[in-house]
Image (cartoon, helix red, strand yellow):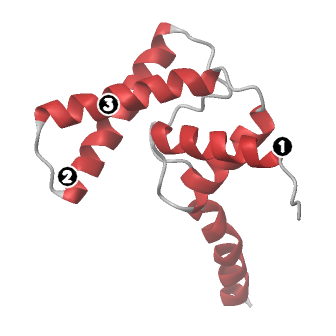
Amino acid sequence: MQVKKTLLALGLLLPMAAMAMPKGFVDPTTFKGSEAEKQSAINYIKARTQKDMKTIGVDSPATLRMMEQSNLDAFKQLTAATDKKLLKKVIKTYCGQIDMCTYQNLKMMYDRDLEASKQDLNW
């Protein structure tokens, strides 16, 4: 009986753990602009960019700085998103369900989803 309870608990908790946001992620939908939040966003961007660069085997300070700046610019733009509900959905998909949680990617997918939400299928 105890084993069944443990398995049930694990079955309920594991999917939630898989959908957890990456460590240090700063949600642009709730960003207020404090110095602490700004520093947290910068720390996340630096760590994430370095991780991604290492994964693909690129070791170039110029490329790293360019990617960091691009992510910071995307983050700033996301803080001004007009459809927060849509942005939260994009964040859940790309940060919680799959590991594509860069602000550049979130901005690109938010823009595409926002545009698609205004379109309809026509003949």
- The residue carrying pointer 1 sits among few (fewer than 14), some (14 to 19) or many (20 or more) residues within 10 Å by Cα, namely few
Per the image, label 3 sits on a secondary structure element best described as helix
Q: What residue sits right under mark 1 in the picture?
A: 118
Q: Pointer 2: residues within 10 angstroms few (<14), some, or many (20+)?
A: few
Give how far across and how far down residue 117 sits, in percent: 81, 47
Q: Position of residue 62 (x, y in %)?
A: 15, 31
**Left or right: where does residue 43 sit relative to residue 93?**
left
User: Tag 2: residue type?
Assistant: Lys
Image quadrant holding the C terminus, namely: bottom right
For residue 68, the mark is 3
Real-space CA distance between mark 1 and mark 3, rounded to the nearest whole angstrom: 31 Å
Query: Which of the two discs, 1 and 3, sits closer to the camera?
Result: 1
Using residue 92 as the reference point, say whether residue 41 is left or right of it. Answer: left
Q: Quadrant of the N terminus?
A: bottom right
Farthest residue in the front direction?
Answer: 123
Q: Amino acid at mark 1?
A: Lys
Q: Which residue is mark 2?
A: 54
Q: Reply above or below: 73 against 91.
A: above
Q: Specify the quadrant of the image occupied by residue 10.
A: bottom right
Judge by depth and name the residue closer to the eye, 11 or 83.
83
Tell me the element at label 1: loop
Q: CA distance from mark 2 to mark 1?
A: 38 Å
